[in-house]
Amino acid sequence: MPVASTTRTQAQRRAATREGLLDAAEQVIAEHGYGAGSLGAIARAAGVSKGALYHHFESKDDLLLALMEARFAERLEAGARIAEDPEGDVPARLIGDVPFNRRWNLLFLEFTLHAARDTEFRRQFRKRLARLREGSADVLERFWKARGIESEMTAEDAVLIMVALGNGLAIEAISNPRLSTDPLYVAGMSLMLDGAVARSERLKST
């Protein structure tokens, strides 16, 4: 009987190295900031040489943009799972699938500050944010349709409000580590959902 090989392929090793570099970049930049978080420190945290890092990413910005895309994709996938669950408690599922992550929130602030000061990074940052919000709006529209919710507000505007709520609470939690913002986010999202349902009923009755 043939024995299954446990040796990873070259493509699998490359993918694992790349993922390790993304995790290391998230850790180093969140802890030390964009300026002090060097590529050398990221490579050391990932357990690879700086040359290996450059094999995967051309620059620090290239690495951070790849990290942003990966984390945004995870959030879109989580949103889609939640929206497609007809029985799920949406606000609670949001926290369960995408809980508060201090390291990620610190990193996102670093993205935002760097984008405010660097024209090219800002262009790339905004492009990726736009894709995330377009994808989130599509998920929200499917959620509304599946539940028969009608809204005078566009899905894009609703997503912007939800994101602003989450980002604002994240900043509060960063500045006060003892503050637990997840329950507040659940409460705020519950109010928004209840309001959307009530408003939809009024629109249907007119």
Image (cartoon, grey):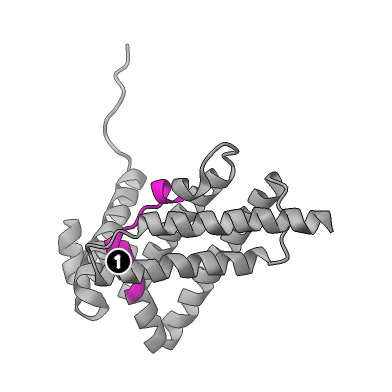
Q: Which residues are magenta?
A: 94-109
Q: Position of residue 136 (x, y in %)?
A: 57, 59
Give the residue at the far right of this rendering: 206
List x then y, in percent, for residue 179. 27, 62
Foreground residue among 36 and 16: 36
Which amino acid, mark 1?
A: Ala
| Drawn side of residue 179 relative to residue 169, left or right | left
With 120 as the anchor, is 85 left or right in this view?
right
Quadrant of the drawing holding the C terminus: bottom right
**Rendered position, 48 above or below 114:** above
Residue 66 visible in image? yes
Q: Residues within 10 Å of mark 1 (few under 14, many from 20)?
A: some
* Residue 168 in the figure: left or right of residue 16: right
Q: Is residue 99 above or below residue 85?
A: below
Q: Quadrant of the N terminus?
A: top left
Instruction: Give the vertical position of 14 relative to 104 (above or below).
Output: above
The residue that appears at 66% across and 53% down in the rendered structure is 197
Q: Quadrant of residue 85?
A: top right
Judge by depth and name the residue closer to the eye, 155 or 63.
155
98 magenta-colored: yes
SS at circle 1: helix
Judged by its main secondary structure, the magenta piece is helix
Magenta span has 183? no
| Residue 178 at x, y percent in the picture | 22, 62
Residue situated in front as seen by the camera: 182 or 25: 182
Residue sitting farthest toward the top: 1
Determine whether, in the image, residue 86 is placed left or right of residue 25. right
Residue toward you, 21 or 78: 78
Residue on which disc 1 sits: 173
Residue at the image position 67 percent from the left and 55 percent from the top:
198
Q: Which percent across, then down, holds residue 168?
A: 40, 71
Query: Is residue 59 something one can see in this rendering?
Result: no
